[in-house]
Amino acid sequence: MIRTPLMFMALCTSMIACGSSNDVVAAISQLDGNTVYGTILAAFGGNCNQLPPQWDTWPMAFHDSSHTGTSTDVVTPPLTVLWTWKDNYQFDLQKGAASPGLNLPIAFQDKLCFQGGLNSNRLFCLHQLDRSPAWEADNSGYTNSGIVYQFYNYPVMVGGRVIFGSVDYTTTVNAADGGGFLNLYNTNGGWPSGGLTGWSGHAYQQFVETDDGTEDFILYQAPVDLTGESRLHSGKTNNYDPRIPAVDPTIQTAYVNIGGQLMAFDANSFTNLWSWGVSTNGASPAAANGVVYFYANGPGTMNALMNGKVLWSTPLQNALSPIVSNGTLYVGSQDGNFYALNAANGAVLWKFHTAAPFTALQIPAISGPLIYVPAADGKIYVLNTSDGSLVNAFAGTTVWGPVIIANGLVFSSDATGTVYAFKPFSASMGK
């Protein structure tokens, strides 16, 4: 029997309804005294009449709008494969198997949803525990249109809806069951590289219009029907690296890399506050406490800015997907190193060398004192956040995509289009 966080939560929920905490202790003891998730029982204090802490979700790229990449779940290695999944549609296999892609995952409730792989016009949602199908949402006009479209566009779950971009359309569906399907014709192209983030019930979207090479940044006030739209339409770009907007809740400011610049907007009114840089393409920003962190490929520097003014700059090589958490910025570089920088002054705290360059899609995840780093050399490294020392590594066979952590489990995908669910050695809930 697979013993998981969700099983324990379901067990305690049912016992709470019966008002019998002693039964909970007895029932958990019958599950072979599982030490992997034994910390859950301790969290209840042996009494299921107390509200338990909550397992975390991962509803968007980088975990949250600020791009902290940090889960409150504390999971420890080694990782054991719980299950794997592959797209088995014959059309997708016939048309897309020659160049499969990474899948870009999000997690909420008991679901794992992802887009990419063999056919990026499909969004799959599975049950996290056993990979059984929950629901699927397809861009039906292009899903079986003679070719498969493969691009990277990161979905989001916000306001009870899952929103994703695909060929020509942005789609919103009910997160619970995939119902309430609604399409908006707006991406204008076959390969709309980009993605979405969510904050305060709003959705923020970026994509490239590949019909003409222009870019868009959009605020949707109402994710349920994609209304209340405000849009910035920018000039042409030749950079298709996927980049995701960020929102700093502390100052209610949205940041986006568009038109070769880093731009700041009021997250509610969409008023442009400031712009910075020239020909700075392809990077996602990260934000914390009024400071935005952003890689500029023109000068080749990671930068910290406040109100459009540079606080510090540190030379790095194509460090496209930073996360910032607890005063430290973490990012992989094209030089094959994974870096930790002091977020206050840009000083390099440590670096860890891998055997291949990082791209925009090797997005790490922090859990307690550890950071899970997906690498292009076929390994997921587990490092100490304090000094970058190696704790453990899971060896795959090819490039890994974003790692996410939710419900005490670890999820990722590789460049064969395979999605992985990992069971850690131990897991405990944060607060």
Image (cartoon, rainbow, N blue to C red):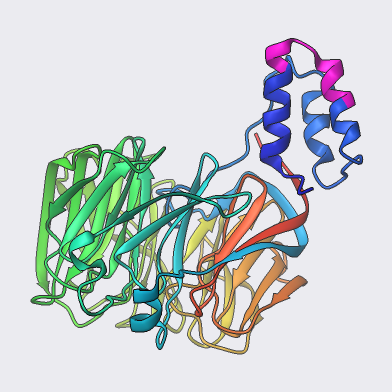
Q: Is residue 130 left or right of residue 270?
A: right
Residue 102: percent from the left, percent from the top? 45, 73
Left-right relation of 383 to 22: left
Nearer to us in this view, 124 or 329: 124
* Rendering coords of residue 252 (x, y %): 31, 40
Q: What residue is at 67 percent from the left and 23 percent from the top?
A: 13
Q: Nearer the viewer, residue 256 or 86?
A: 86
Q: Residue furthest top?
A: 19
Can you say whether 49 is above or below 170 in the image?
above
Asked if residue 25 lies in the magenta stretch, the reply is yes
Bounds of the magenta span? 16-26
Residue 189, percent from left and from top: 14, 71
**Residue 247: percent from left, percent from top:** 34, 48
**Position above or below: 16 against 3:** above
Residue 309: quarter of image: bottom left
Magenta segment includes 84: no
Q: Quadrant of residue 92?
A: bottom left
Give the mark count.
0
Is residue 247 something one can see in this rendering?
Answer: yes
Image quadrant in which the C terminus is located: top right
The single residue placed furthest to the front in the displayed view is: 90
Residue at the (57%, 52%) spot, across then down: 70
- Front residue of 290 and 210: 210
Residue 175 lies left or right of residue 223; in this view the side is right
